[in-house]
Structures are given as C-alpha cells and as structure tokens.
Amino acid sequence: MSVRFAIEPLAKTHKRSSFTCGNDRIDNYFRETVSQDVRRKYATCFIARDMERDQVAGFYTLSSSNVPLNEVPESQARKLPRYPTVPAVLIGWLARHSDYAGQGLGEALLFDAIKTVAIAPIGAHAIFADAIDDKAAAFYTAFGFTALIGRPRTLYLPVATALSLVSAST
C-alpha cells in the first residue's frame, strides 16, 4: 500500500459522515454504529486514512469468534483437534470508500487485518469473514478463503495460510 495511507485504530477525530462505499448497510454501520461496537468491546475498528486528504479511505472490524467444527470444510476439519468449536477472529466488516476503487485498498486492508490477527497475543486458528453479498464473497475467495458448510457467505481461512499469503505478497 502506498505511503499515502496510514492504517490506525478508529478515533473520535476520524470523519465518518462522508464515508460511502456503495452499500447502504455498510455505510450506515460505519457512520452510525461502529463506535458503539468499539466502546462495548464487541469489535475493534481500524481505518485507512488518506493522509493527503485527511479522509477515511476504508476500514475493517475484528471480533473474537468461533465456529462449530462441523461447519468447517472437511479437508481442513480433519487436521484439527476434535473440540466442538474452532477459535477464530471474525472480520465482520471491511470496506473501502468508493473514491478509492481499483487502487488495491481492499487487499491492503485485508492483509493488515491478517497481520493484526497474527501478532495478537491470543490463540486463534482461523480468520472468518462475513461477506455482505456475493461480490464480497468472491473477494475473499480470491485470497483463498473457503465457505463454511451451509453458510456460503461466511468464509474461513486458517491463520497459517493467511500468513503465507501475506508473506508472498511482500
């Protein structure tokens, strides 16, 4: 990602009111709800700030999560301990402002989320993403995420696989 952007935790000083990614649900969440989720410790939120324009260019949220082992694709589930659930981190929301389409910002936000999860001092086997629509699901699938059994828009990627993906891109 260009040095034009800084990825940082969401702060009160970040201007959210003009954020638009083209999806009303995401726009409304980011403008009106995300700060409540952060305050309640339901999620953490990181933003990509365009340093030249002092504008929020994109954001993602992370939350602790788990998924039932029987929903993980068999090819991956057979390698896991037989605990009832798989510890994970959820990318609940990830979006970039429509002004930055085609600049690789979505990928940069995803890779930053992966790095954030990887260095966190907590155990998590996988990263999950809740895709808001089929286009978002295709975005995650392009980076190796696999749909959960019976939940095509909830996608799964082992942290170890995610780290190799990030390493290959640098």
Image (cartoon, rainbow, N blue to C red):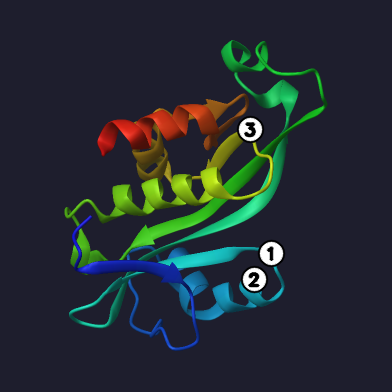
Classify the position of the N terminus by image quarter: bottom left
Left or right of residue 170: residue 69: right
* Pointer 3 or 2: first along the chain: 2
Q: Residue at x 46, y 51 (%)?
A: 113
Label count reads 3
Give the residue at mark 3: 125
Please state which amino acid type lies under the numbered disc 3: His
Please state which amino acid type lies under the numbered disc 1: Tyr
Give the residue at mark 2: 37
Q: Position of residue 148 (x, y in %)?
A: 59, 28
Q: Position of residue 27 (x, y in %)?
A: 42, 71
Q: Residue at x 59, y 16 (%)?
A: 76
Give the residue at mark 1: 42
Pointer 1 and pointer 2: residues touching (CB < 8 Å)? yes
Q: CA distance from mark 3 to mark 2?
A: 24 Å
For the residues carrying marks 3 and 1, which lies nearer the camera in this image? 3
Q: Which label was assigned to residue 109?
A: none
Q: Position of residue 39 (x, y in %)?
A: 67, 77
Please state which amino acid type lies under the numbered disc 2: Asp
Pointer 3 and pointer 2: residues touching (CB < 8 Å)? no
Can see residue 132?
Answer: no
Disc 2 element: helix
